[in-house]
Image: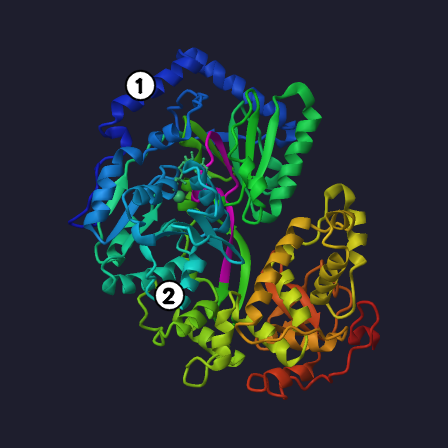
Amino acid sequence: RRKVPQRDLELEETPMELGGEQGRWEEERLKTASLSFGAKKEREQGMRQEQEKYQLILEEDEMIDFVSTDQDTPALSQAELKKQSMQEVRRSLPIFPYREDLLAAIHEHQILVIEGETGSGKTTQIPQYLLEDGYTKGGMKIGCTQPRRVAAMSVAARVAEEMSVKLGNEVGYSIRFEDCTSERTVLKYMTDGMLLREFLTEPDLASYSVIIIDEAHERTLHTDILFGLIKDIARFRSDLKVLVASATLDTERFSCFFDDAPVFRIPGRRFPVDIYYTKNKIYCYKEQVLIMHPSSCCTFVLQEEIEACCELLQERCRRLGSKIAELLVLPIYANLPSDMQAKIFNPTPPGARKVVVATNIAETSLTIDGIIYVIDPGFCKQKSYNARTGMESLIVTPCSRASANQRAGRAGRVAAGKCFRLYTAWAFKHEMEETTVPEIQRTNLGNVVLLLKSLGINDLIHFDFMDPPPHETLVLALEQLYALGALNHLGELTKLGRRMAELPVDPMLSKMILASEQYKCSEEVLTIAAMLSVNNSIFYRPKDKVVHADNARMNFVVPGGDHLVLLNVYTQWVESGYSTQWCYENFIQFRSMRRARDVRDQLEGLMDRIEVEVVSSQGDNIPIRKAVTAGYFYHTARLSKGGYKTVKHQQTVYVHPNSSLFEEQPRWLIYHELVFTTKEFMRQVIEIESGWLLEVAPHYYKSKELEDSSSKKMPRKQGKTKEELG
Ligand code: CDP
Ligand code: MG
């Protein structure tokens, strides 16, 4: 039996179904049951009709055979969400009855863990309760961290609306490259990474009276580091309140970590969700997206598949025409612009249905009301890190059982729901991990190590980690920072390191920007840095215009590599006067460009701080490529017999087919990142000369390692290697 801390403030031992609220809940269920189907027979008939509805939409050969594991299928209902004023909605949230108890508990304890179902009101209500209770007196702030940008922006917008204030005034948000706060801001939502950076300017977070580490169960790298730092400052800032909020996962561990801090549980309000599994393994789930019943559905897919999925659904609806009710297909993912995001929260017009196609952002960080069905293909995209080779890759893997259950939980918020898992019950039991491994154990730590060093934390081995990173990952991060010149041989921060830490980007990118000073090309390098930070969504490639889109893309190709192509796109866009029309004509995503421009402006604004003058190389691309090399020399690959191999670890890697250098195959390449899909692909590559490696990183490369080639270029004949040319 799990250990329950002595001072535990658990309000109800038993889950809702068995607890004191049973009566109300049962009644509600009965009511909804009789509303929709009434007697059992009718209910069965209802189920059949529902089945027929799926068939209507699925083409025959795509029909999936589902098995239900839950015999006691409750009647479906379409719980009508009453149109209420915002204040009424606030009062109707599960957290509301516990407002006073919660405030009392916060008053009594410095650190409190708060556990509650997604949608119970933790994120939007707690900061408001605190404000109403006087925690912002004297201009003190309440900070609330979110692992995701979208969540930070959307909850801030929601809370501003609830408080009838303008977003950015009393309520604001701060995410990387975007600060929507002002002098007046007292409720500040921000990404966990941003709060981490605030330690650089305010090491004791003196301007905050309360810090809420929200979505703690996500265990992002930044959240985990915050745990250690905040636990530390709480010791000498006895006036600081620390709240650790989490979905119903792992709260005992948080309590343990924070010296047995009490856990405040907000009893959930949850309707039953039936789980269905497929009988057989599904290989291509994209085609299997179902549309069912006149109510809402949430489908979890990977970010890069969202647009395709939405198109597929819309296409199918068009084909079915008036045979089905109006269907709103709404995507939600991290980079979606906020006006589009807002759409998923709008009420569905009467008679219409809403299908939300989401990444795992909708698992716990965003609450979308009215979801009755969930379709869960069972995958997520996860960073993984090989501490031996230092290679980071994004891999599509089965999600954890905890994630799958959170996803299913999205269906039971307003009424009994259903979750269709596009995998077998066997796979759920045997192929999925229990929980997701914390990010700190599967990522490159260069960034946070640099940050911690800048905060004066030198002994990282003994840092108070909730789950320590693997030793070799930590060592490698130190080695890489040393190679980049950010640390000296004693592991102390250098002047360069201090400047690198000023930029809110990865150390390699930071180094690239700083190196542009020496190579006199900061103008161009800033653009490249900005474009790289939005790199995967610049080019638009609609299915029905693939040829046009590819031609348009080809028109941007310049010799030297993808970084220079990105630079070219940006430069032409600037020349067009930042035109939307120009983007449209050239199959460029305007939103991504607008974001690149924002990022660039922000970075340029920081150049003063790190004393880098913004100058242009006047069309010479060699300095630019050298600056890239100075930052990314770790990412060097060389063409040899079997294809490309990384220089340090001899790992086989491939140029991504989207790259401008896909056919050209230069001898030496630097890649921006590796992505593992079917193979290890290098994304965003640039051609370099091996001699430059000795110039930018003499301590890292020995000339012997680079010697079996000359720095001369390979003969350029489309795609032919030395061997082929004899
Ligand atoms: O943090 P937690 O998951 O406990 O809940 P929350 O994010 O505070 O959401 C509470 C309620 O606020 C949701 O059920 C939604 O009804 C509403 N909400 C919204 O309408 N729009 C948002 N952007 C966020 C929340
Ligand atoms: Mg929340």
Alpha-carbon neighbours of circle 2 within 10 Å: few (<14), some, or many (≥20)?
Answer: few
Q: Is residue 662 visible?
A: yes
Name the residue carrying label 1: 27
> Is the CB atom of the residue marked by disc 2 within 8 angstroms of ligand 2's nearest atom?
no
Name the residue carrying label 2: 202
Left or right of residue 276: residue 538: right
Q: Identify the image quadrant of the C terminus.
A: bottom right
- Element carrying mark 1: helix
* Vertical comparison of 75 with 297: above or below: above
* Vertical comparison of 234 with 701: above or below: above
* Vertical comparison of 267 with 660: above or below: above
Q: Which of marks 2 and 1 is nearer the N terminus?
A: 1
Q: Residue 71 carries which label?
A: none
Residue found 32% across the figure and 49% down from its top:
136
Report the image quarter containing ligand 1. Answer: top left
Residue 261 position within the rendered picture, expressed as x and y whole percent measured from the top left: 22, 53
Under mark 2, the amino acid is: Glu
Q: Which of 627 and 601 is in front in this view?
A: 601
Magenta residues, start to end: 362-384
Disc number lying in front (2 or 1) = 2
